[in-house]
Amino acid sequence: MSKKKPKLGQNFLTDPSARMRIVEALGDISTSTVLEIGPGRGALTGLLATRAYRLIAVELDRALAPRLAEAWKHAEHVRIHQGDILELDLAKLEEIPGSTQHGPLVVVGNLPYYITSDILLHLFAQANSIARAVVMVQEEVADRIAAKCGNSDYGVLSATAQMHARVEKLFVLPPEAFTPPPKVHSAVVRLDMRPRFEELQVERIGFMRFLQMCFHQKRKTLVNNLKGIPTPGVEISKSATVLSMIEAMGLSPSIRAEAVSLEAMAQLYRKLCSSC
Ligand code: SAM
């Protein structure tokens, strides 16, 4: 008989030392507002509440959220909010009753794996409101986020993450650290948010679209991926132009996106934009 998938990605962390290591990876949070994503049954919530200046925890489950809210109703600095993290505008957290914000956020969560990428993209889109995030993801996702350019795991998620943050893979946990155990190993990553758009002189939305195009088909060359895909904001149609620019930058005409550094990607994007 096949086992049912846990509802809402609910694999609860039961390993006490892992809980402590995650919270410690946040560093000193005594003056920070901490946003916890998916507190569930509160595996991290208690440890966070004793250390954070303020804690806002956002849980989608309509049964778990009120239970946790009841447990923390007397702690003035803790706010449990029932809602979807993907719908939360981090710059407007103070609109949640009782949740005044205090400087850039520190984010933490053992993420629900069915929407890991969506949550990461949501956090990156709001990187200016976040100082640091420590999140548990599937190990394979952690390897992709942290992969260095040139590595076979390096792809659009790595490039996106590394345009927004300094990434560190901290430690790995086996399925037995959770109830019910997930099918995969998990890993904790720390993201120190440092968006690089200004430094690399590229506009965020346009450059993010450009990266999507560059990695569109992983096995294709960069030139072929950039050939004739009409995307609003980035009009790239002439493969001859792309090819000549790539060659002028000293890169091989058959290079793939995974081998191109973010600095070179930004240089190519700037050249293409200025030639449009
Ligand atoms: N933090 C708890 C722990 O470590 O045991 C629970 C982690 S569990 C992997 C993920 C949690 O995220 C679940 O409690 C789930 O209900 C919640 N969740 C799922 N989707 C969510 C969403 N869109 N917004 C907020 N919470 C969500």
Image: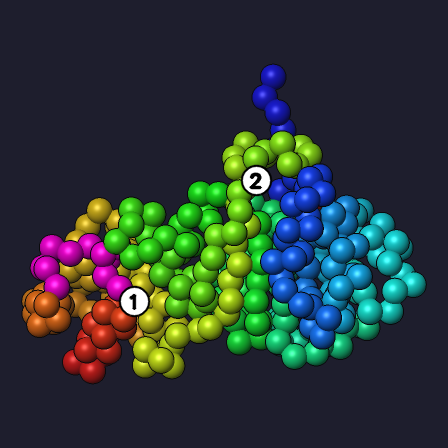
Q: Identify residue type, mark 2.
A: Leu
Place of residue 80 in the rendered image (x, y in percent of width and height, measured from the top left): 79, 60
User: In the rendered image, which quarter contains the N terminus?
Assistant: top right
In percent of the image, x 66 and y 76: which residue is there?
Answer: 92
Q: Identify residue type, mark 1.
A: Leu
Label 1 packing within 10 angstroms: few (<14), some (14-19), many (20+): some
- Asked if residue 80 lies in the magenta stretch, the reply is no
In percent of the image, x 60 and y 47: which residue is there?
Answer: 112
Residue named by callout 2: 173
Indicate which disc residue 166 carries.
none
* Overall secondary structure of the magenta section: loop
- Asked if residue 259 lies in the magenta stretch, the reply is yes
Which secondary structure, mark 1? helix
Return the residue nearer the eye: 128 or 84.
Answer: 128
The answer to whether residue 276 is seen in the rendering is no
The answer to whether residue 211 is seen in the rendering is yes
**Span highlighted in magenta in the image:** 251-261
